[in-house]
Amino acid sequence: MTAVPATHVSAVLAWAARLTAAAPQASTAETAAYLTAKAAVLEAIAAEPAAGGWSPRDIAAAAEAAASARQAADAAALAAAAGITTLEDR
């Protein structure tokens, strides 16, 4: 596996900034999409071999953060499917 491109990490960080600026009016669908992308980047980091420069502790932290992001993405997707358009509407 190759290293996660910095452009992927940067794109997720920029997306986080846009959602933060839009909160709490950000849509649940947009939030779910962002959290899914965040989880994918964190999963890719966690899957990198330790030789890629990540310590076992960092890899474990990335895996834990990815799992949390997946869980939050699933919750946001369910909210969107239920017709809740923003997290403020919950």
Image: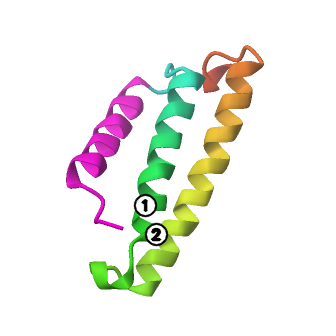
Using a 10 Å C-alpha cutoff, classify the residue at mark 2 as few (fewer than 14 neighbours), some (14 to 19) or many (20 or more): many
Q: Is residue 15 left or right of residue 28?
A: left
Between 75 and 3, the one lying in front of the other is 3
Please state the horizontal and vertical placement of residue 66, each as a whole percent of the image: 54, 58
Q: Which residue is mark 1?
A: 44
The amino acid pointed to by label 1 is: Ala
Q: Main secondary structure of the magenta part?
A: helix
- Magenta residue span: 1-22
Residue 62's disc number: none
Residue at figure coordinates x 41%, y 53% from the top left: 41
Residue 48 in view? yes
Residue 46's disc number: 2
Disc 2 is placed on an element classified as helix
Q: Is residue 50 left or right of residue 26?
A: left
Which quarter shows the C terminus? top right
The amino acid pointed to by label 2 is: Ala
Please state the horizontal and vertical placement of residue 10, each as a whole percent of the image: 25, 47
Disc 1 is placed on an element classified as helix
Residue 13 within the segment the image draws in magenta: yes
Marks 1/2 in contact by CB < 8 Å: the verdict is yes
Asked if 2 appears above or below 68 in the picture, the reply is below
Using a 10 Å C-alpha cutoff, classify the residue at mark 1 as few (fewer than 14 neighbours), some (14 to 19) or many (20 or more): some
